[in-house]
Amino acid sequence: MADYIVQRGDYWHFVRRVPTAFAHLDRRTFVRAPLKIRVEDDPAGKRAKRAAEEFNRQLESGWRDLSEGRVQEAGIRFEAARRRARTLGLIYEPALVLAETASTDELVQRAFRLAASGKIDDPLETAAILGGVEAESEIPSLSTLFETYERFRSFSNRGKSDDQRRKWRNPKLKVIRNLLHVIGDKRIDRITRRDALTFREWWEQRVLDEGLDPGTANKDLSHINSMINEVDLKLKLGLPRTFAGLSLEGASNNKRLPFETEFIQERLLLTGALDGLNAEARRIVFVCIETGMRPSEVCNLTEDRIHLEAPVPHVEVRPDGRETKNFWSVRDMPLVGVALMAMKEQSRGFPRYRHKADGLSNLVNDFLRNAGLMPSPEHKFYGLRHSFADRLTAIRVTDEEKDSLMGHAGGLYGQGPSLAHKAAILDRMVLKPPERV
């Protein structure tokens, strides 16, 4: 057992490799857990050894339950103990958690409560008050949280493209790496409010030391909160909202700045101004200017969604192997001015940038900055969409018309504005195109 005790910093930790016999049931390579015992308080590791023995006993019991197919039975026992604790006005905590976190007064009060009940020999009563039943083995540790969360989100994510899945995964994997660094690996039902506050303090220090935006920390806190809440909901654990209400103040407003219409007309639509971009990238910019479409919507247009010979030339914004931002993003968009000119040159779409909108945006942003075609360092390519919205506002369109053209959630009833109606709106604000695209 002594081999399972490891000193990490000022504390003793439990570390054990998952035995080969259980590797197919527990996908972790190592089981790691803080024992919350300071080395200076227990230099010989005697208390740490006793805590590790208890943790190991529960760990092996869980492995045996998995191996013998008793996960459901374990879950039923746990749920019964949790419900009984609630009826007694208590919050159910596993015995090891009580031993680590409860005050002496709380432990004494629980013992008196059990004695006063006259049910010391009742396994359910004992389990409810003193935490004698471990939660079902399906409860993930922090290191396996994302795997469980992703499985539970498989239905919601079914429409995402590979690139969208990558962008969905990465920030969630990042916060798990950060949290593992700060509090170590532990089962999610054993993550305490103190752990969450420690993580917040770690982020506060990083913001101060590295000059980071507090919004970066808030994204981490939001992602871990969402993941734990989703797993809690699916496994019916009844966990407290440990990471709720911890956002840091002072996050910057990342609203994209719009380009002034005059700047677009005189600088971006000047013949030859964008010749330094490759043809597909240049034409995507032109389409964005006169349609307000998201760059990803233009990048992923396919030949069968482009209708240049229709009475009203237009493109169809559809999922087509990817997930649209929302229900209202699915729409038909008329083509006028420079957008129509560009699409006539790209009648089969933009294969170079299909599912690569991030790469396209980075390229365009770099080009515009280097060419002196950004109004300010804070402007970005995506700001052309906001410019389009401002141009709609300037000609006093209705909210319904604006939502229909922008692909925004709104109070749309029936079919909404027709293609001809939308084209007429765009004709009222069309800009003078360059001589070539």
Image (spheres, rainbow, N blue to C red):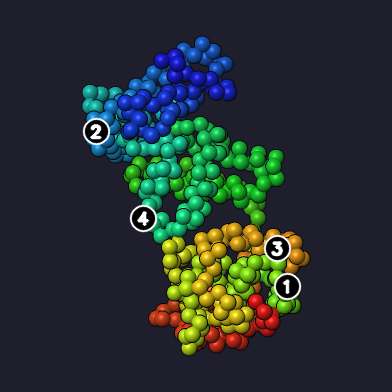
Which amino acid does the dot numbered 3 rest on? Phe
For the residues bearing labels 3 and 1, Cβ distance under 8 angstroms: no
Height in image: 90 above or below 310? above
The answer to whether one can see residue 257 in this image is no
For the residues bearing labels 2 and 4, Cβ distance under 8 angstroms: no
- Judging by the rendered image, the residue that carries numbered circle 3 is 367
Element assignment for label 3? helix
- Judging by the rendered image, the residue that carries numbered circle 2 is 70
Element assignment for label 1? loop
- Judging by the rendered image, the residue that carries numbered circle 1 is 273
Spatial CA span between label 2 and label 3: 61 Å
Mark 1 vs 2, N-terminal side:
2
Residue at 47% over, 32% down: 185
Q: List x then y, in percent, for residue 36.
A: 50, 24
Q: Is residue 238 left or right of residue 7?
A: left
Which mark's residue is nearer the viewer, 3 or 4? Answer: 3
Which amino acid does the dot numbered 4 rest on? Phe
Spatial CA span between label 2 and label 4: 27 Å
Q: List x then y, in percent, for residue 146.
A: 44, 43
Mark 4 vs 1, N-terminal side:
4
The answer to whether one can see residue 57 in this image is yes
Height in image: 135 above or below 291? above
- Judging by the rendered image, the residue that carries numbered circle 4 is 155
The numbered mark at residue 392 is none
Q: Is residue 398 left or right of residue 186?
A: right
Height in image: 17 above or below 435? above
Q: List x then y, in percent, for residue 261.
A: 69, 77
Q: Residues within 10 Å of mark 4 (few under 14, many from 20)?
A: few
